[in-house]
């Protein structure tokens, strides 16, 4: 009887009765599971054991997290050090694209949005065409730690407000939103505390500011908004556009105007223009009226 019980407990003939656990799973099976997870979840699972760590480094896992045109994006990313000429893994490429990458100099940056493999882009005020920027009676660039570019364009006073810009880029397929990052008043530090001076703020409650967005394939968006929240950085939503092909560059033109010359306006900081995936969770945005 005892012999019969022992034979039953030992399992089928030829199968080891050793301990089992997550580490005994085939690495290929674990990789198949990771294909369906988000990057942050993959990195957390990689800490469980060697098998999961190996699967989390597999190219087949990370290639699904990269956009189709990742080679184009890697070529645009300045400062990528591959002096040894070695082949980068897909995980390394993903990590490189997710960091801040300068685009064509110090006045534009982009990075990969981790969840959907779309692009986030920032365009400095120095890369924009601003009417009157060369005349210090109206505008001047001021240093600030509150900008990722460490500089913003500050408007003292002007009759004709016109800020324009454009970019051409192979955006991964998806829907993107464009914003102007603006601030009423000039923020400074006094005794270690943030203080906002409303000295030059005026004229923004008379007429709304108009925003426009157009693309090279005929998409158009327009909105308008009163600037009425001094002391805070606000993202003003211009509109959305769709990138239908990651292989073809999309030209995007955008503007912010208030050209009613019956009154002056001033006290405005223009930091940057942002292009983010639609629905991307970011800082406070203003409710603009779309035209």
Image (spheres, helix red, strand yellow):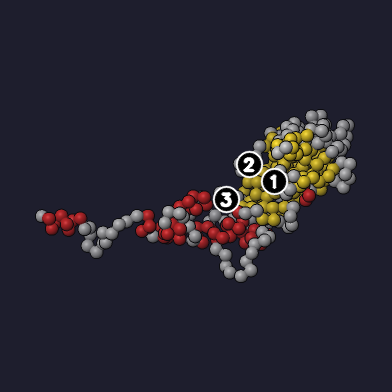
> In the displayed structure, does residue 201 sit left or right of residue 221?
right
Query: Which badge, 3 or 1, comes first in the chain's sequence?
Result: 3
- Residue that extends furthest to the bottom in the rendered view of this protein: 85
* Badge 1 element: strand
Q: Are marks 2 and 1 in contact (CB under 8 Å)?
A: yes
Q: Label 3 to label 2, Cα distance in Å?
A: 14 Å
* Badge 2 element: loop
Answer few, some or many: residues within 10 Å of disc 1's Cα (few below 14, many 20 plus, some between 14 and 19): many
> In the displayed structure, does residue 204 sit left or right of residue 67?
right
Query: Quarter holding the C terminus?
Result: top right
- Residue linked to disc 1: 274
x, y percent for residue 6? 17, 57
Query: What residue is rendered at 72% in x and 41% in y?
Result: 181
Q: Quadrant of residue 82?
A: bottom right
Query: Which badge, 2 or 1, comes first in the chain's sequence?
Result: 1
Q: Quadrant of residue 132?
A: top right
- Residue linked to disc 3: 114
x, y percent for residue 233? 71, 38
- Of residues 119 and 193, the one drawn nearer to the viewer in this rendering: 193
x, y percent for residue 235? 70, 39
- Residue that extends furthest to the front in the rendered view of this protein: 191
Q: Is residue 290 visible?
A: no
Query: What residue is rendered at 81% in x and 36% in y?
Result: 267
Q: Quadrant of residue 16?
A: bottom left
Residue 217 versus residue 138 in the image, above or below: below
Query: Quarter holding the N terminus?
Result: bottom left
- Residue linked to disc 2: 282
Q: Label 2 to label 1, Cα distance in Å?
A: 11 Å
x, y percent for residue 216? 73, 51
Answer few, some or many: residues within 10 Å of disc 3's Cα (few below 14, many 20 plus, some between 14 and 19): some
């Amino acid at each position: 009887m005892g012999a019969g019980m022992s034979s039953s407990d030992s399992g089928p003939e030829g199968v080891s009765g050793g301990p089992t656990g997550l580490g005994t799973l085939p690495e290929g099976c674990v990789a198949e599971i990771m294909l369906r997870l988000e990057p942050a979840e993959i990195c957390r699972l990689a800490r469980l054991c060697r098998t999961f760590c190996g699967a989390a480094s597999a190219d087949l896992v990370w290639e699904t997290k990269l956009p189709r045109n990742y080679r184009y994006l890697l070529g645009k990313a300045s400062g990528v050090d591959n002096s040894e000429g070695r082949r980068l893994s897909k995980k390394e490429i993903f990590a490189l694209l997710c960091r801040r990458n300068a685009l064509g100099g110090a006045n534009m940056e982009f990075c990969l949005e981790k969840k959907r493999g779309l692009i986030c882009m920032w365009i400095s005020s120095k890369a924009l065409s601003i009417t009157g920027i060369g005349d210090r009676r109206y505008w001047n660039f001021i240093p600030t730690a509150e900008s990722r570019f460490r500089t913003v364009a500050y408007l003292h006073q002007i009759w004709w407000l016109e800020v324009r810009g454009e970019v051409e880029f192979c955006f991964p397929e998806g829907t993107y939103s464009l914003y102007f990052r603006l601030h009423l008043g000039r923020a400074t530090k006094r005794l270690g505390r943030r203080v906002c001076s409303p000295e030059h703020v005026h004229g923004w409650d008379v007429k709304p500011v108009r925003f426009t967005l157009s693309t090279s394939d005929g998409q158009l968006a327009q909105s308008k908004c009163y600037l009425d929240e001094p002391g805070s950085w606000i993202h003003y939503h211009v509109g959305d556009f769709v990138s239908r092909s990651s292989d073809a560059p999309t030209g995007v033109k955008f503007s912010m105007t208030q050209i009613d010359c019956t009154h002056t306006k001033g006290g405005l900081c223009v930091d940057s223009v942002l292009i983010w995936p639609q629905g991307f969770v970011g800082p406070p945005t203003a409710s603009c009226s779309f035209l």
